[in-house]
């Protein structure tokens, strides 16, 4: 059967339920802990920060499928199903016998997969009768997606944007403001935790951990507000499972069995969403896949981090999560151009990695942009820097197939477009981009400050 360039699904094939991979995990992810007691966080504990229904989803380890409300599914129809594309042009350029497919999530104004969870979280906030939500954003995709979702439901949206991204990506910031969100560079002097971080790290360019702390403080300090997060949490991976479910449906439609599945990894939203139904098959013993998480060498949580309980934020106001972490006070180098700036990794993905159900690779920034430019020139899409980490390893795997003659099916997630990342592309084109890899001493200094929790 000839495979078309783009495999499209119908509206009826949009998933009707999210898939919760935790239900099929024999060893569940470790629970969130309350910092003051080190006891597992209850629904009551989390309800002060998150929306009630999202708390239920966060703590649900048992239900494999959770129905997608019709209002959310109708919103999905504006840009979903997203296409699964056969990268014929890239295959020819590489001279590889491999078949390369990418799931393209950039067909919406936010330019990324983040809208899949943003609309769900805004829906539950509206259903609860809240005034608005607060959040953080790194590269800006999540903040953009959430501002779109809150505008749709008539909610207020307060975004704390990592300072280096706020300065490098003014147009991403303006899209958020156009949709009605307020955008504050983080760390800022508008919160207690922001002022404390600035005092300890004067001149800092910020991190997601910093921005999370400020967003949480703002949420708990204002009646009628809750905090929402664009990655890391179980609830976010749940919502993003639409990516993997659609991918599997499209592959099954043409009788294609993936051999290698690749996703970029920062906090885990895209990777977790893409791989979830395939990991589910592995857990149930139905199929096997090589699954590769790709992270930046400048923020290598999986490949150089420690599997331990750590704070989810730099200001240490959030619960503790057991995850692969570089330490909550780790701040990536300012020359790191994309997102994927979080110090830790999803607890769910961390447990899967710990069990050996997937592997991880770290890649340097200049090689990532080499791959991004090569992809753009033959496939016609300017990829986001985050997505380009997956492109880098997909190309590497395809070149291995060229050496061995194997015609593997390689699937990767193209999380979004890079049209708001042109400062980074400019630095690459002007040969001003460099690589920074933290030293063992730098990482050890951060890891030495992990909270004392028995693992």
Image: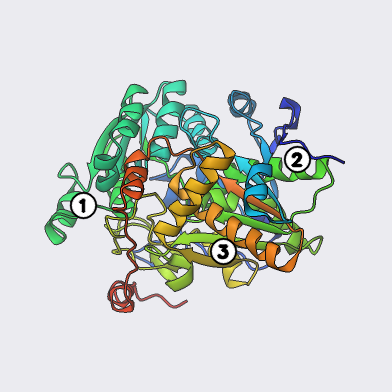
Structural distance between the alpha carbons of marks 3 and 1: 29 Å
Query: Quadrant of residue 390 in the image?
Result: bottom right
Q: Position of residue 259 (x, y in %)?
A: 73, 59
| Disc with the residue nearer the chain's start (3 vs 1) | 3
114, above or below 275, in the image: above
* In the displayed structure image, the side of residue 409 where residue 443 appears, left or right: left
Disc 3 designates what residue? 29
Q: Residue at x 78, y 62 (%)?
A: 284
Q: Position of residue 421 (x, y in %)?
A: 37, 40
Mark 1 lies on a secondary structure that is helix
Structural distance between the alpha carbons of marks 3 and 2: 29 Å
Query: Quadrant of residue 199 in the image?
Result: bottom left
Tell us which disc is closer to us: 3 or 2.
Answer: 2
Q: Position of residue 128 (x, y in %)?
A: 47, 31
Report whether residue 323 is seen. Answer: no
* In the displayed structure image, the side of residue 356 where residue 385 appears, left or right: left
Q: Which mark is residue 193?
A: 1
Disc 2 designates what residue? 250
């Amino acid at each position: 059967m000839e495979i078309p360039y783009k495999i499209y699904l119908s509206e009826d094939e949009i998933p009707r339920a999210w898939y919760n991979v935790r239900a099929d995990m024999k060893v569940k992810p470790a629970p969130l802990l309350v910092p003051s007691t080190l006891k597992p966080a209850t629904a009551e504990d989390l309800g002060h920060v998150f929306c009630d229904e999202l708390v239920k989803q966060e703590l649900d380890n048992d239900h494999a499928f959770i129905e997608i409300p019709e209002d959310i599914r109708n919103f999905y129809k504006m840009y979903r199903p997203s296409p699964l594309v056969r990268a014929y042009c890239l295959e020819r350029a590489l001279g590889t016998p491999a078949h390369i497919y990418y799931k393209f999530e950039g067909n919406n104004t936010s330019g990324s997969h983040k809208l899949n969870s943003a609309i769900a979280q805004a829906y539950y906030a509206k259903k609860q009768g809240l005034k608005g939500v607060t959040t953080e954003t790194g590269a800006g995709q999540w903040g953009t997606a959430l501002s779109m979702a809150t505008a749709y439901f008539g909610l207020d949206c307060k975004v704390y944007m990592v300072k280096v991204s706020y300065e490098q990506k003014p147009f991403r910031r303006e899209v958020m403001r156009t949709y009605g969100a307020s955008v504050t560079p983080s760390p800022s002097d508008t919160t207690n935790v922001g002022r404390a971080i600035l005092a300890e790290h004067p001149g800092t360019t910020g991190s997601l951990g910093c921005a999370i702390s400020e967003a949480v403080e703002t949420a708990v300090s204002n009646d009628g507000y809750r905090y929402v997060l664009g990655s890391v949490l179980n609830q976010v991976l749940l919502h993003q499972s639409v990516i993997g479910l659609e991918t599997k449906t499209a592959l099954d439609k043409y009788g294609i069995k993936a051999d290698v599945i690749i996703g970029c990894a920062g906090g885990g939203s895209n990777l977790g969403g893409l791989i979830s139904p395939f990991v589910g098959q592995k857990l149930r013993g139905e199929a096997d896949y090589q699954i590769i998480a790709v992270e930046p060498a400048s923020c290598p949580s999986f490949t150089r981090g420690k599997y331990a309980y750590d704070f989810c934020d730099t200001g240490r106001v959030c619960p503790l999560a057991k995850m692969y972490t570089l330490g909550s006070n780790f701040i990536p180098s300012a020359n790191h151009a994309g997102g994927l700036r979080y110090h830790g990794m999803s607890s769910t993905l961390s447990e899967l990695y710990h069990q050996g159900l997937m592997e991880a690779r770290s890649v340097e920034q200049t090689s990532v942009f080499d791959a991004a430019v090569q992809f753009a020139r033959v496939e016609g899409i300017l990829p986001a820097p985050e997505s380009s980490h997956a492109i880098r390893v997909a190309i590497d795997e395809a070149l291995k197939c060229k050496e061995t003659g194997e015609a593997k099916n390689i699937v990767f997630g193209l999380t979004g477009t890079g049209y708001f990342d042109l400062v980074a592309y400019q630095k690459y084109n002007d040969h001003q981009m460099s690589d920074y890899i933290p030293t063992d001493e730098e990482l050890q200094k951060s890891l030495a400050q992990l909270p004392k929790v028995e693992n």
